[in-house]
Amino acid sequence: MVTSEDRHGALVDVIHFADPWCWWSWGLEPVLSRLKEVYGDQVNVVYKMGGITDDVSEWRREYDVVDDQALKAWVAESTSLTGMPADNEYYLKSGVKTTWPACIAFKAAQLQGEVVAERFLRRLMEVIALDAKDVSSEESLVEVGKEVGLDPARLGRDIRSGKAKSLFEHDKVEMNVNFLTLLYANRRTGKALAVSNVFEAGQHETTVEKVAGVKLEKRVPVDILEYFERHEGATIFPRELTEVFGISPFEVEGRMKILAAGGLVERREFAFGATGWKYNPGPTKSRMSLEQAKASHVAGFSQQESHDKMNEIITNAVKGLYTQVATNPQKKYHFPLGREALRFVGYSEEIEKIPEAALESFAGVGYPHAARAIRPGDTVLDIGSGSGTDVLFSALRTGPKGKVFGLDITDAMIEKARANIQKMGANNVKILKGDATRIPLDDASV
């Protein structure tokens, strides 16, 4: 997940001139989501407001859609191209007169941070395109802002202050592409390329690589439920899942049916015929069935690739997830973590002897010490040692005459475990880098 702090080190800016009322902006959401998932903090999505019109009636005359049926047909044709559903009558049902207040409100939201502003934009687009509501009044804009975590009082003040309007005017002047275009710019070299009228991620990823000019690390999104958790509150549609995870609409439907039946997501059906899902926070996520776990985890684009390539992809996905667990244990995950997990699997009060920094990133699935098989003086190997909870617990059992080795593949976990070993003064514990297929120890040494 990319934070606002991460973005300062990005190599490529992805510039999107949008408008909450624009179906093309809504249609590019799956592409932007895919880019964020694949490239992480190597790219920075820059949202600017192009502003469709200050007079919807004049805009309809300009584009020859004064007739209601013509406007509905335009929306229907456009959303069929993007794959992101919208009520064909959302302009008509809402009675919107101008799109600018929503644009100004987004600029006001950006003053509170890019991440929360992006949540605000997403929610605005949903309220507009799916619920066909007019959010032009300050009251309605502030209400949406409150939903996503914005300070409502500040949002109202910033909308009224004139500063947000000035920022919006600056964006409009700067806009040199249309709403169907994403502009890619290298921060270091200034090289820039645009991709227009493309609502599938492949060409956009190719353009990111060209603009970067260097090989970028590409993550492989594999966990559907975790994606939903990180987008809690948003309605996720099939097109977004097909783009982000590289699976077919048919496969999306099958996987989501299982997750919805288990109460992990909530299926939403709209009167105009669309179906999407929202994350359902609750205790069930800590007790996923094997069927639900399989439904949540996908292999991404590489299902037909070689066995070695598949191993590489899975390894990178695991490293990516557990790097987050090591560095951001406060984040929501679809499995128990830290003290919650320790209590769940049955650890005793002895864990209080272990540094909190080790406990907070514990993601184990069992309590191997229940059998009390480790004796003083034993040599122990923990494969998948993580932040160090089990190796340190083992050290308590072996005593200073024993030896404990931990093995892990994730650099962030290894670094954290070594720091925890030092904190505890466990001189008989050593963390090694490697996996179960290549253990860097002599035969029969454990």
Image: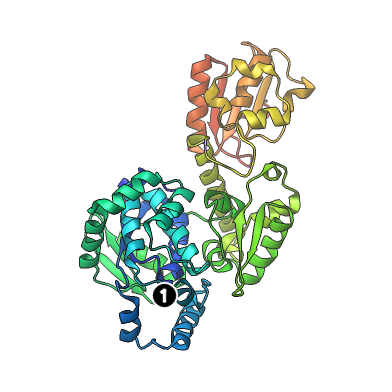
Q: Compared to 445, does 326 lie above or below?
A: below
Residue plotted at (77% across, 23% down): 370
Q: Compared to 323, does 24 lie above or below?
A: below
Quadrant of the rendered image containing residue 400 = top right
Q: Which amino acid does label 1 sit on?
A: Val
The residue that label 1 is drawn on is 198
Residue 381 or residue 15, whichever sits in front: 15
Residue plotted at (58% across, 43% down): 333
226 to the left or right of 93: right
Q: Where is residue 99 in the image (x, y as percent from the top left)?
A: 35, 68
Q: Compared to 55, does 163 lie above or below?
A: above
Q: How is the image coloured?
A: rainbow
SS for dot 1? loop
Can the viewer see residue 15 in this picture? Answer: no
Q: Where is residue 216 in the image (x, y as percent from the top left)?
A: 39, 55
How many marks are shown on the rendered structure?
A: 1
Residue plotted at (65% across, 15% down): 396
Q: Position of residue 398 (x, y in %)?
A: 67, 15
Quadrant of the rendered image containing residue 55 = bottom left
Residue 382 or residue 289, whichever sits in front: 289
